[in-house]
Structure formats: C-alpha cells, structure tokens
Image (cartoon, helix red, strand yellow):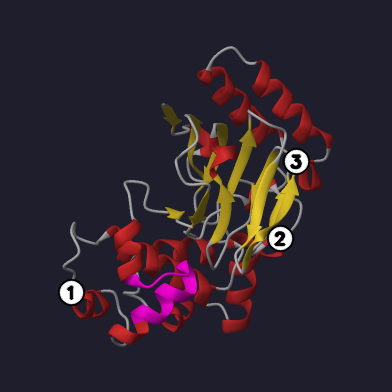
Amino acid sequence: MEFRRRKPAGALAGFVGILWYWDAAPRPHALERLLPDGSMELVINLDRDMVRIYDRRDIRRFERLEGCALVGPHSQFFVIDTAQQVRVLGVHFLPGGAFPFLRLPAGELHDLHVSLSDVWGGFARELRERTLAAATVEQRFDLLEGALLARLAKPLEHHRAVRYALSEFQCGGKRTIADVTQTTGQSARRFVEVFQQQVGMPPKQYCRVRRFQHVIRSLPPGPAIDWAGLAAEHGYFDQAHLIHDFRTISGLSPGEYVGLRSEHLNHVPIIT
C-alpha cells in the first residue's frame, strides 16, 4: 500500500487542503459509504477510465462517470466501490475552496458527481492522460497544481462574508448562523446566496455537516460513549437530535458507525 500527500503552498494554500495519491489492493468489502465533510473533491482513477457512484437507496444501481470526476459538496453519504480505489489521484479542496476553478456557481454541484470534462472540457481528459504518463507521484502532484492554476476562472479570494463565516463555522456549532450573518453586515438572503455560490450548499446544511464531522472526530475509542454528553458539547438540543442528524447524514445510527469505523473516518464499509 502507498499513500502519499502534499499540501500546496503559495496561491493554492488557502483553497486546496491536500493533493493525495493512493495505491493499494482492493479492500475485502466491495462497497463503502463516503461521509460528507462540506468540501469538494477532484478524483482521477489511474487504474480504469471510470468512476462508479451507487444509488444510496438501491446499491444495485449505479452511475458511471469518466475516470476523471468532480465530487460536489454533499449533505448526505454516497456509495462507491472499492475496486475503483486501486490506484487513485486526487485533490481535496478546503470547504469553499473549489469555486475559483469553476465557471459555474458551486451550488450547482450540490449533492452531485460529474465527469470533470463536463466542467473543464477536453482539458480534463488531457490531465488524466498526462498524470498516467508521469513517472513519479511528485510529478503527478506538480501536474495537478499546474492544472488548477491553468483553470482559474475567478480570483483566489473568498467574498469577505464567506471567508468570515467559514472561519466561525469551523468551531462546530458554537456560533449561530444568525449571529454570523449579522456580524457580516449582509442581509440574510444575500448571505445565503453568496455562501451557496462559493461553498456549494446553504449555511444551515453546511453547519449541520461540519457539526457531524466534529462529533465523529471527537469519539473516544471503544464502544462506551456518552452520547448525551457529546450532544450537549456539540450544540445539539439533546441526544435524539444528534441521533437524527447522524442517521440523516451517514445512513447509520451512532452505534452502528462506531462498530464499523476505522482509521479512515469518512470511509465506512458496507457489509452485505
């Protein structure tokens, strides 16, 4: 197994979390749930020119995309197969980080997967071919950074209200949307509009996903977990509220998630 990553410097640093490369044998389970974190992902399958996304309500059905795909910001889990994770290259954007590289509002990709050629045209296919031909992982990372800079459609700068809100919402439910909106000086309608254009989902859904992420990252090892205490700590009304959000976002109860979790917190095996 090989897992490599690079954190971009310079102009890309505020928009791209990591560039990553994964090369490993298929896992023992065929399908995985991928849990949302409020960000977007560019994925290049270097093994086969195909990406499959399964219907979370009926995993017998799937959508087939080209081998270079863009994952929009999601509010709920989606399902992929492990066979397409044999050799993969990707860009993990920071929340709100993909919009400068798109010629459409990020909100149009909410809960969607698209072939990257639908957004970048033939440049996407050329990028996959060039990364396949590269001799080293570092060269592939160089190609990704160059491609992002070449496809800039907007300045590498957030709207000031979005920049402030993303910083405040990282606290995981400590600030209300109304408080943040008032501080930005924007009307509620205008704030939702610019946030959705750049981040890809409304502030309420984004905060819901981020709070969920804070919860799974704060879970102690072992099955004995104080769910009521976690609910209070992370700003839920009560334990029932936490369980409801957990099921809506992940498709699992908190207890089911704990029983299936691994070091890859957002990749949850589907055992059939």
Which numbered disc, 1 or 2, marks the residue that appears first in the sequence?
2
Label 3: state its secondary structure: loop
- Distance CA(mark 3)–CA(mark 1): 44 Å
CA gap, disc 1 and disc 2: 40 Å
What residue range appears in magenta? 242-254
Q: Residue at x 44, y 75 (%)?
A: 247
Farthest top residue in view = 135
The secondary structure type at the circle numbered 1 is loop
Q: Residue at x 34, y 57 (%)?
A: 260
Type of amino acid at the residue the image marks with label 3: Glu
Judged from the image, the secondary structure of the residue bearing numbered disc 2 is loop
Q: Is there any visible trace of residue 263 in the rendered image? A: yes
- Relative image position of residue 41 (x, y in whole percent): 58, 47
Relative image position of residue 15 (x, y in whole percent):
52, 46
Q: Which mark is residue 226?
A: 1
Magenta stretch holds residue 196: no
In this view, the residue in front, 199 or 153, is: 199
Name the residue carrying label 3. 66
- Towards the viewer: 41 or 77: 77
Residue 157 appears in the picture as rendered: no
Residue 160 percent coordinates (x, y): 53, 62
Q: Bin the neighbour count of mark 1 within 10 Å (Cα to Cα): few under 14, some 14-19, many 20 and up.
A: few
Question: Is most of the magenta stretch helix, strand or loop?
Answer: helix
Q: Residue at x 30, y 62 (%)?
A: 258
Q: Residue 44's quadrant in the figure?
A: top right
Q: Earlier in the sequence, mark 3 or mark 1?
A: 3
